Amino acid sequence: MGIGRFAYTPMLPLMHAHAGLSAGMAGVLASSNLAGYLAGVLLAMAPALRGRRLATVRGSIAAVILATAAMAIPSLPLWIVLRFVTGVASRFAFVLCSSLVLDRAAREGKPAWAGWLYAGVGIGIVLSAAAIPPSAASGGWQGGWLGLALVSAALVGATILALRDEPAAWRQPERLAAAGRDRRLFWWLFAAYGGEGLGYIIPATFMVAMFVRVPTLAPVANVAWALVGCVAIPSTLVWNRLGLRLGAATALGVALAVQAAGTLAPIVAPNAYGATLAAISLGGTFMGITTLANALGRELYPERSHVAIGRLATIFGAGQIAGPLVATSLTLHTGTYDAAIVAAACALFLSSALMFVGARGRSTGVA
């Protein structure tokens, strides 16, 4: 998933320079991918998939690899379709694999598994940043997409061999009752996670393209994206541990505030330091926020984990669809990405405030 979704960010400058992709169509492709995410989320919540999670995850991964490889075909209408297909398949894999792993982690008392699961996305980002330059050097932008598909295919063996699904065997009444008392917190989480979808997707999609446009940032553009992935890998473990210590809702509020502040760094300091801070704050929080949000959602709805995770992914997907459209509109109107970055930061600060309010309500028993 890290490759299928996030490789578009470092591929974007190549597509602009050598494939004739305009700034406006870049936003359309991003939104097509995210519309696919939303469709995939809605379908993944279907009750019929509860007993077919593993087969669906495997098929979805295969679809991601094939659609990534097919991006090498020079056809704008096809690209729109392929990014949509990648979005659908990625979200099937994300929602159902999250449900599968978090259910088993709860049964076996292994809360740290959530951090390990979502660290995989950061690994995918690092692999994409490493694979694109040599692939593009030999085959241009088309070679970049094909190289990414090959790297993805190399990871499939571990997924097919290691994943297991087991019927849910735990439904402890006291846990379900406790979750029911806190379920009003879910709607604070729901709103905040939607804001995260809108806020994070703007730098996550346009970071490399934005840095390339600024002379002082262009030399570090690709390095900054690789740094996002490197920091993302351990961040899920760190935020998962903080969530266990502080409470997931409070930890989410902190993570969202950190991400918001870092998003503004390239505007405040348009140099290598600002770019580094932006990369570290994005990589260090976005998958940690996903880890905390899904773990909290599952905690509040333990008997319907795939529905809770699906609802969160739905509002997150809606925010992701809006984000690139807002960013593209502001960029075309102003000529720079600055206004889009400020809008993203505002959404993230608001989401942080919502989680702190929700966490406070939970601690006082009025969440």
Image (cartoon, rainbow, N blue to C red):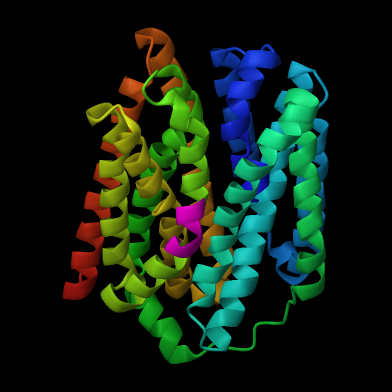
Q: Is residue 155 above or below residue 164?
A: above
Residue for point 64% across, 22% down: 14
Q: Is residue 16 above or below residue 255?
A: above
Q: How many marks?
A: 0
Horizontal placement of 262 versus 62: left or right?
left
Q: Is residue 183 above or below residue 310?
A: below
Residue for point 36% across, 22% down: 216
Name the quarter where the C terminus is drawn.
bottom left
Horizontal placement of 53 versus 111: left or right?
right
Residue 182 % position (x, y): 33, 72
Q: Is residue 347 above or below residue 184?
A: above
Q: Quadrant of residue 218?
A: top left
Horizontal placement of 189 versus 37: left or right?
left
- Can residue 152 be seen from the camera position used here? yes
Residue 307 % position (x, y): 56, 62
Residue for point 44% across, 33% down: 202
Residue 197 % position (x, y): 44, 43
Q: Can residue 268 be found in the magenta stretch?
A: no
Q: Quadrant of residue 231?
A: bottom left
Q: Main secondary structure of the magenta part?
A: helix
Residue 134 % position (x, y): 72, 36
Please state which of residues 107 and 364 is positioned toward the viewer in this rendering.
107
Q: Which residues are magenta?
A: 230-235
Horizontal placement of 207 versus 186: left or right?
right
Please state which of residues 283 and 330 is positioned toward the viewer in this rendering.
283
- Can residue 318 be seen from the camera position used here? no
